[in-house]
Image (cartoon, rainbow, N blue to C red):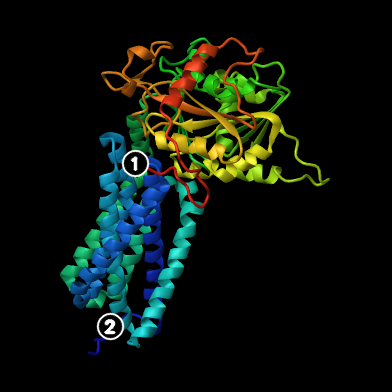
Amino acid sequence: MAMKPARLPVPSGLGRLLVLAVVFVCAACGLVYELELVALATYLVGDSVTQASVVLSVMVFAMGIGALLAKRLRCRAAAGFGAVEALLALVGGLSAMALYACFAWCGQSRSALVGFSLAIGVLIGAEVPLLMTLIQRVRCQDAGGAVADLFAADYVGALVGGLAFPFLLLPRLGQLTGALVTGGVNAAAGGALVLWLFRRDLSTRARWLLLLANVLVLALLATGTLLASSFERAARRAVYGPEVRVAVQTGVQEVVMTGGTGAGAGAGRGRKGSGRPLELYLDGRLRVSADNEFRYHEALVHPAMAGGPHGRVLVLGGGDGLAVREILRYRAVRSVTVVELDPGVLRLARTDPGLSRLNRHSLSDPRVHTVTEDAFDWLRQRGGAAADGRPPRPYDVIVSDLPDPGITASTKLYSQEFYGLAARMLAPDGRLAVHAGAPVQRPRSYWTVEATVRSVGLSTVPYRVSGRLADFSGAPDRAVGLVGPDGPPVPVPPGDEAAVPARRIKFWGFVLAARHRPRLGLAPDAPPLAAVTRAGLRADERGAAAGRIRSMRPSTLMHPRYQG
């Protein structure tokens, strides 16, 4: 059946080019919406593999539904496309703000994530049939040629949108403003195509309704853009509390610091400027609390400093300088190399009055050398022979102070390949200390780390140290505590763990490894410690052994085993 040609204000060749240009813009905006949902879901919920799979599979399914529903609109393709684009711009543009609001004030965003994925997918899926109808009305051509032209513009637009999101929108505008601006571009392109190029296909009523709808959408998106900073501050206060001092988006992650500038429990409990202890959040996860970080860092560092020389030390991660603080308490330490991915964290550790006081200005010590690089890549480069053919100089102690293995972005840093590279950097009598996650809350993940370390030929001693319950603020993996009756976490006093039900305690899990079975203890020159004792370490070893899960398989780059 021949399609009635559209009455255009421009020649058909130019009209066809304009339609393809709008296809390009809409495809770019559609992919930005998808990537924005994936990125925000990863940040708010965690586990990027799972969240990406949920978002993309739901959206692809919804696109099929949208394509079927659009068949009913083909007889009014111009009006239908204008309505679809206005609605898509509104939903897609406000999606980031809505998801963040659900997370901040409702405590969860999974349902909203699925809902927005469905809605955006349906609207994106409806675009193609309607655009196919419009391009055929501009100039009728064979179906194969029209499909080829349409999808060529669509795929190129998707490429541009996919590159613009991580390299332009996210670093320059951020999640909220980037989505709002994308929605504005989407609404302007769709509205201009319909209200100008295909205006003769619209009734007067339809023209005014679409014009009003687009003006309203653009006004809402513009208002959202103007209020984005205030909204983000209010949402951040709802998530982190009212005392947010630092909130920066580095090239790697969002860094938020709350509370005062006190020294924390491990350094005298002095506090200045605020009654709340300093807390450091990375991508929404609580990584440091001045009230109890000393327990974590003492347990991570000091057992590894025993059992042999500790003159040369390598810290993988640890950009906050707190593990380095503990290492520098030994006079025998001659050099410390810190490999940290995020220069923003290193900068804060040196310059922020609270964090630099807490780490005792450890990163400014002349014995400390910092490297801004991915730990895996750095080990791979340094693990080979030097230019003169000599092997790299080994380290007496390696401390792996990295995010929890349950976070997908960290999976490769808990892989067999990673520990194999680390083992090559160990001196013959060197020790490797690994932060291995929560042995009680995530036992399979913890024992997978232990099995992975063993798989590279190292003998291991797993141990756990009691901390606080991690059931708030995005599943933190470091600073943990008991949840009090009103919600905020309260510390577990050292030695009082027996009075608390086991299910109410969060344990930090560690693995100490060496070429020969290491003995868990403290070095003769160990400084006075606030939380770790020799007797306590023996109990920590027994406690971890009691929960051992045998026959766990190691995690590799090709077969990661930390999800779930």
Crowd rating for badge 1 (residues with CA inside 10 Å; few <14, some 14–19, many 20+): few
In which quadrant of the rendered view does residue 9 lie? bottom left
Q: Which mark is residue 249?
A: none
In which quadrant of the rendered view does residue 499 lie? top left
- The foreground one among 465 and 50 is 465
Q: Residue at x 36, y 44 (%)?
A: 226
Position of residue 245 measured from the top left corner of the image (x, y, whole percent): 45, 26
Position of residue 397 measured from the top left corner of the image (x, y, whole percent): 65, 28
Q: Residue 7 carries which label?
A: 2
Kind of residue sitting beneath label 2? Arg
Q: Which residue lies furthest to the right in this view?
A: 388
From the viewer's perspective, is 47 left or right of 523? Answer: left
Position of residue 436 measured from the top left corner of the image (x, y, whole percent): 49, 32
Q: Which residue is drawn at 51% across and 38% down?
A: 451
Q: Are marks 1 and 2 in contact (CB under 8 Å)?
A: no
Relative to 256, residue 111 above or below: below
- The foreground one among 96 and 42 is 42
Task: Specify which label sits upstream in the sequence, 1 or 2.
Answer: 2
Q: Which residue lies furthest to the left in this view?
A: 205
Relative to 180, residue 400 above or below: above
Q: Residue 227 carries which label?
A: 1
Kind of residue sitting beneath label 1? Leu
